[in-house]
Image: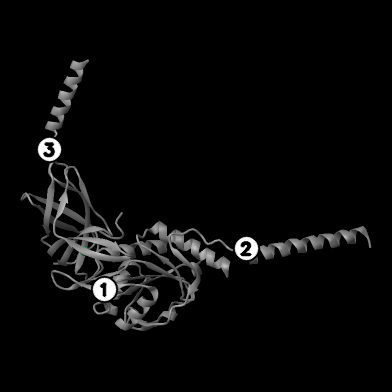
Amino acid sequence: MKRVLSIFLLVLVSAAGCAKSSQPPYAEDPWVREPPPGMSMLAGYMILHNPSSFELTLTGASSPDFAAVEFHNSVMEDGVSRMRQETSLVLGAGEALRFVPGGRHMMLIAPGRQFSEGDKVLIELSFSDGSELHITAPVRSGGGH
Amino acid sequence: MGLQRILMIIGLAAMAVVAGLWLQLRMSAPAVPPETNATLLRTARPVGDVRLQDTLGNELSLQQLKGRWSLVFFGFTHCPDVCPTTLAILSQVARRLENLPQAQQPQLVFITVDPERDVPEVMKGYVEHFDKNMIGLTGELSQVEALAAQLGVAFQKVPLDQGGYSMDHSAAIFMLNPGAELNAIISAPHSVEGIAGDYRKIVEFMAEQS
Ligand SMILES: [Cu+2]
């Protein structure tokens, strides 16, 4: 019995060791809200997953279609909505960051052209380890889902 | 006096008693306000008149909102996240309430806290994007401030790193009754189900009260 247990433990430990994964991050359901005409800022949303066993730090974003892309968080303080910039975002091992309407979002600043429903927005996310993630986010109208 | 006559009198008397009791019950029973997430003001609070501008640049006094219930939200068009999210929700709320009698359906009102940039033409394109019937209001900053102060709406300009500015602003939705008086305050976070449900309950309750 003792022997069975120790084999079991050995298997468990080695499995955990092997599980150290370096799977790349990925964006689930990225989308950009269709803007009213003439808007200088758009908001993009997604769920950003880090399936690896390592912490990742999101340090920036850019898009060929926009002058700048920033990370913002809409927070509520005493019933007042405030939008604050976040310069870097930490993604723990196996964790996900939710970018959702009325919360954290990608702020797409100064579009180079008009966007309407069905268009695609290219966004490049960069991480502190030098890696990049390219996302194609469709433009959608309405509240989201 | 025949038996028939006596019976008729007793019958009438009984009916009168029942009717009287029913009336008394209706008049004196303290109506229980509905359970809502919204804060209901049992006595609606009058709002001092202000003069704003509609999306065509015509002067519109707050009194002109009379006649219908209104759902009023304050924001600004350079707001990429919270305002579009809320206005999209309001437009869905209006669609969900389309099965109410016409007179009880809400009019949607978006008032800018950034009249400097949100001139009528900008407001027009913005509100029509969300709902073709939405009323967009801008105007003199002093008028917007006067209205905001009465409703307890806070707003403040916040400079942005890359130039320009954003606005911090209250996220509540105000429900004005057909007399253009403040009747309920709906606090964020907002949802279509939450607002539509509270709206129905409040309109029904206020109709019973009157
Ligand atoms: Cu933002």
Residue B163 location, quadrant: bottom left
In the rendered image, which residue does mark 3 sit on?
A21
Q: Amino acid at mark 1?
A: Gln
Which quarter shows the N terminus of chain A? Answer: top left
Badge 3 element: loop
Residue at 64% from the left image edge and 67% from the top image edge: B27
Residues flagged by tags 3 and 2 on a common chain = no
Question: Badge 1 sits on which subunit?
Answer: B
Left or right: A40 in relation to B187: left
Give residue B150's position: percent from left, percent from top: 39, 77
Q: Residue furthest front?
A: A2
Question: Badge 3 sits on which subunit?
Answer: A
**Dot label at residue B156:** 1
Above or below — where is A54 with respect to B44? above
Mark nearer the viewer, 1 or 3: 1
**Dot label at residue B29:** 2
Question: Badge 2 sits on which subunit?
Answer: B
Mark nearer the viewer, 3 or 2: 2
Q: Amino acid at mark 3?
A: Ser
Residues flagged by tags 1 and 2 on a common chain = yes
Q: CA distance from mark 1 to mark 3?
A: 47 Å
Q: How is the image coloured?
A: one colour
- Whether tag 3 and tag 2 are in contact, CB under 8 A, the answer is no
